[in-house]
Image (spheres, rainbow, N blue to C red):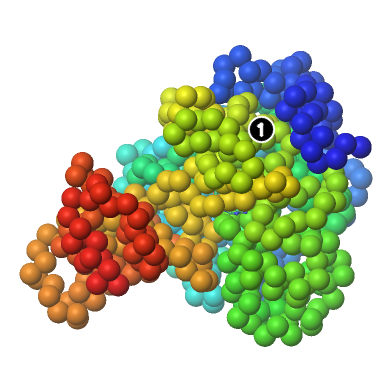
């Protein structure tokens, strides 16, 4: 077998051979006639002419071999419940949900929005959509009404599946009222809202629109819904992500390419084997949850754990307890979760039998060396940092122990993953840079199977956002700085744009600014990401008031800060709430009016703000310094 370097080279230089071979890992109802169509770059279609189905590959395909094998295990430390769905019972549940969606007229190409906590019906709904050839759009439960409304208006779902509430750290977090509020804000209307009532939060169903999940499940139980065979390039889902504008982008994913890419990654990157258990601590509202809670492990015939809870309740040993109890062989988490655990009793790491665990994978934000050291020593297992984005759907950079075991380096997500023609390019000229040189991390098209096919409903924005940022050549910009060293190990050095990463959650500062500005007292604001020991980054806001004379005392300012934070919570959700909002007379801007964010960040982090020759009024930066 080829090593990591040689298989990467083959995947780029001889795509047909490499991907033609890999495609055999999934079931094709109709074989494809062409591996990839690159006649319309930067758009690419993978496995042209082939027909397949994600739900079939994740669920039906595994039914025969061992129907009683666990497929989905739900553990909730929030409501103290555990449930195991076998391959057979998962199939039954998915069919029941597919039947209820079908009864609402959902079919091929229709959108279904899923706004749910980490409960099994959310996974059933995703798989049911896939079964029907419908397109799901899962919205993270931490997002609130304005975020939701934007996504509803953009995706135009026929049906929404939701729940009365979730629970976080023992506190009920209502979903249904936020959805109701969002629907009031929306220009579009939906046909039906299916509500799984967990009995956590009392609500009045909207008559003629809201339907009860349990009633429908009973009604459709035992029904078998035929798998819809879809074109390989048919959209499987839309997942919204933040960028530099206030308008989130609907990342559109294909079907066949995604199935193949995930199947390969489960083997080459994650070393997951059928019959084993995968534990991913992400949320189904994020791309990691789509790929490695739901589709990846199930496509590989693994048992996947859906965990509703925090890593520290009932105590900081809960994740390790799950590893022992369910004999987890592969675990995937985010550096923030591990930093949280670092504050717990280190003995908790020794309390459980972790012998089943092969490695811990981490992604979503930079993995700092102290955290990596702490967890690797504590576990005595390989820690595999992997780098990717919502857009790519699976890792761009990672160690690939399923291909070849190579040493890792702290701080580096190792090597380019097969299929990704990654380069470090010069920001000014677009030219490729060599070892040790910092530049923009870019990918030469075509993007590999499973990566985004376009922005939902906006091909032009796909090209203008991602393929026009690097000068003089049409390459995909990751909007991350990076470099590779003499030994071929790659490093990520932060974002090139205004996107911030709070506890592994990607947030657009523009969206937060718009929400802060929505307060009647605020004239304008700047939101930046500032380094934080626990969360990686936190949002810090600086606001200019319309009538500063009304807020002169500390108490008045503090009250206003609380009010603005509440507004952000209500509009975007608590994830987006700035850690602090400070009031200044003016924002540091260039003479052409552009806010000097990098200078603000530098000042907040106690660093030298660098070249300030373009600043209109240097005292504004001084004021920021004083305010913190
Ligand atoms: P998201 O689309 O929410 O998954 O966020 C993707 C962004 O998170 C990337 O563009 C990076 O800025 C950051 N990121 C993800 N994984 C890593 C990693 N392993 N190391 C450093 N940054 C990462």
Residue 295 in the image: state x and y as whole percent.
Answer: 70, 46
Q: Residues within 10 Å of mark 1 (few under 14, many from 20)?
A: many
State the residue at coordinates (41%, 37%): 154
Q: Splitting the image into 4 quarters, where does residue 423 fall?
A: top right
Q: Splitting the image into 4 quarters, where does residue 620 fall?
A: bottom left
State the residue at coordinates (67%, 85%): 345
Quickly name the residue at label 1. Answer: 421
Q: Pick the residue in front: 336 or 619.
A: 619
State the residue at coordinates (21%, 66%): 623
| Element under disc 1 | loop
Q: Is mark 1 within 8 Å of ligand 1?
A: no
Q: Pick the residue in front: 452 or 403.
A: 403
Which quadrant is home to the N terminus? top right
Would residue 514 be visible to someone looking at this image?
no
Q: Pick the residue in front: 528 or 596.
A: 596
| In the image, residue 402 above or below residue 378 | above
Q: Pick the residue in front: 99 or 27.
A: 27
Would residue 622 be visible to someone looking at this image?
yes
Residue 51 in the image: state x and y as whole percent.
Answer: 73, 24
Q: How many marks?
A: 1
Residue 193 shown left or right of residue 548 in the figure: right
Residue 253 in the image: state x and y as whole percent.
Answer: 59, 35
Residue 418 in the image: state x and y as whole percent.
Answer: 74, 36
State the residue at coordinates (76%, 35%): 8
Residue 373 shown left or right of residue 166 in the figure: right
Which quadrant is home to the C terminus? bottom left
């Amino acid at each position: 077998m080829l090593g990591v370097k040689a298989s990467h080279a083959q995947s780029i230089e001889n795509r047909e051979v490499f991907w033609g071979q890999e495609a055999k890992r999934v079931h094709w109802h109709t074989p494809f006639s062409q591996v990839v169509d690159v006649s319309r770059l930067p758009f690419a279609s993978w496995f042209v002419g082939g027909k397949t189905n994600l739900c079939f590959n994740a669920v039906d395909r595994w039914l025969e071999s061992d129907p009683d094998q666990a497929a989905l295990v739900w553990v909730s430390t929030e409501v103290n419940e555990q449930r195991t769905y076998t391959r057979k019972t998962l199939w039954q549940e998915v069919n029941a949900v597919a039947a209820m969606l079908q009864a609402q007229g959902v079919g091929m190409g229709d959108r279904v929005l899923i706004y749910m906590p980490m409960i099994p019906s959310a996974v059933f709904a995703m798989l049911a959509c896939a079964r029907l050839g419908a397109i799901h759009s899962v919205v993270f439960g931490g997002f609130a009404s304005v975020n939701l409304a934007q996504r509803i208006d953009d995706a135009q779902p026929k049906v929404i599946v939701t729940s009365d509430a979730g629970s976080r750290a023992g506190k009920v977090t209502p979903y249904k009222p936020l959805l109701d509020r969002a629907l009031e804000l929306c220009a579009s209307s939906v046909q039906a809202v299916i509500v799984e009532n967990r009995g956590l939060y009392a609500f009045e169903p909207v008559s003629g629109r809201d339907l009860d999940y349990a009633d429908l499940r009973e009604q459709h139980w035992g029904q078998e819904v035929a798998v819809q065979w879809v074109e390989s390039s048919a959209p499987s889902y839309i997942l919204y992500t933040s960028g530099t504008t206030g308008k989130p982008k609907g990342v559109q994913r294909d079907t066949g390419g995604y199935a193949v890419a995930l199947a390969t990654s489960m083997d080459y990157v994650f070393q997951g084997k059928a019959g084993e258990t995968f534990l991913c601590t992400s949320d189904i509202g994020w791309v990691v949850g789509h790929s490695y809670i739901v589709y990846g492990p199930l496509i590989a015939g693994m048992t996947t754990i859906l965990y509703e809870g925090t890593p520290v309740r009932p105590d900081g040993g809960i994740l390790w307890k799950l590893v022992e109890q369910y004999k987890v062989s592969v675990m995937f988490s985010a550096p923030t979760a591990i930093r949280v655990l670092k504050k717990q009793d280190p003995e908790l790491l020794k309390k459980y039998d972790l012998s089943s665990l092969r490695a811990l994978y981490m992604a979503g934000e930079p993995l700092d060396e102290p955290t990596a050291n702490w967890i690797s020593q504590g576990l005595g297992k390989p820690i595999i940092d992997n780098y990717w984005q919502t857009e790519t759907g699976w890792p761009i950079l990672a160690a690939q122990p399923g291909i070849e075991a190579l040493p890792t380096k702290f701080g580096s997500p190792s090597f380019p993953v097969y299929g990704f023609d990654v380069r470090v390019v010069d920001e000014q000229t677009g030219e490729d840079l060599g070892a040790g040189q910092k530049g923009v991390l870019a990918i030469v098209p075509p993007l590999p199977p499973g990566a985004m096919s376009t922005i939902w409903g906006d091909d032009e924005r796909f090209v203008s956002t991602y393929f026009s940022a690097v000068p003089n050549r049409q390459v995909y910009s990751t909007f991350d700085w990076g470099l590779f060293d003499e030994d071929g190990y790659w490093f990520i050095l932060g974002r090139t744009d205004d996107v911030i990463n709070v506890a592994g959650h990607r947030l657009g500062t523009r969206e937060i600014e718009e929400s802060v500005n929505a307060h009647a007292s605020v004239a304008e604001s700047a939101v930046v990401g500032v380094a934080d020991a626990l969360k990686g980054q936190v949002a810090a806001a600086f606001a200019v008031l319309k009538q500063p004379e009304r807020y002169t005392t500390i108490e008045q300012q503090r009250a206003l800060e609380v009010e603005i934070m509440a507004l952000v919570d209500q509009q975007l959700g608590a994830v987006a709430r700035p850690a602090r909002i400070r009031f200044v007379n003016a924002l540091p801007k260039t003479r052409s009016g552009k806010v000097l964010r990098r200078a603000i960040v530098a000042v907040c982090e106690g660093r030298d703000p660098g070249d300030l020759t373009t600043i209109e009024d240097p005292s504004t930066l001084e004021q920021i310094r004083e305010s913190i």
